[in-house]
Amino acid sequence: MSYQPRILAFAGSTRKDSFNKKLVALAATGAREAGAVVTLINLHDYPMPLFDEDLEASEGKNEHALKFKQLLMESDGILISSPEYNGSISAVLKNAIDWATRADEGEAPGSLPAFRGKVVSLMSASPGGLGGLRGLVHVRAILGGLGCLMLPAQTAVSSAHDAFDELGNLKDEKRQQQVLYQGQELTNFVTRLNQQDS
């Protein structure tokens, strides 16, 4: 059987009707169409306390944090649609990243196996005019600093409250194809990377 990239896809939001959940689901569809095995998750299903090193020392790592980190470690690529909160990254996304950076037994401190070498594609959706673009700057800086390979192409959907139809597709066909292509591009890049390493 030919190589199939493993892609983890999620939004940095837990809101039920999140625009970013709809957006990342579209990108996940593009990745599947390109041959990837995609795991689409909802961070609402992985509730984690605010990261606190004292809490970690006294109670160990939260079970949902462990599951989330394992999903990252099992992936070759990551699709993230991140909302913009006050010009930056959402608290739930930053907290999940912080927990996943913690070294577990048998891991060297700072080895970052959940992130180092993972290929990441970013997007955002916002009711605002910039579509969450300011927040993506911070997400890109954080994940790049953790050793992720950040693909340059990204999508920011403005006026998100009016951008999707009742089926969760983007009304703008050109933008719809752009988001699908991001999933395809991530899949193709990871595939080429794997073939070079083999």
Image: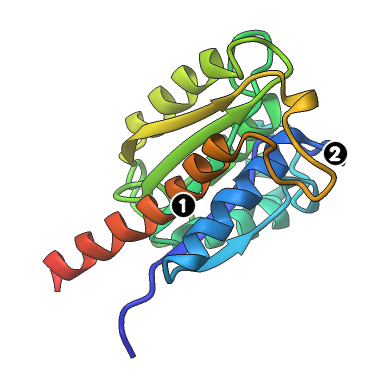
Helix, strand or loop status at disc 1: helix
Q: Closest to the observer: 28 or 181?
A: 181
Residue 166 found in image quarter: top right
Q: Quadrant of the N terminus?
A: bottom left
Please state which amino acid type lies under the numbered disc 1: Gly
Q: Closest to the observer: 172 or 105?
A: 172
Mark 1 packing: few (<14 Cα in 10 Å), some, or many (20+)?
A: many
Counting from the top left corner in percent of width and height, residue 50 is at: 72, 31
Q: Residue at x 48, y 55 (%)?
A: 104
Residue 160 found in image quarter: top right
Which residue corresponds to mark 1?
A: 183
Please state which amino acid type lies under the numbered disc 2: Asp
Which residue corresponds to mark 2?
A: 17
Q: Can you see residue 105?
A: no
185 with respect to 163 (left or right) = left
Helix, strand or loop status at disc 2: loop
Q: Earlier in the sequence, mark 1 or mark 2?
A: 2
Counting from the top left corner in percent of width and height, residue 173 is at: 59, 40
Q: Residue at x 71, y 43 (%)?
A: 21
Residue 172 found in image quarter: top right
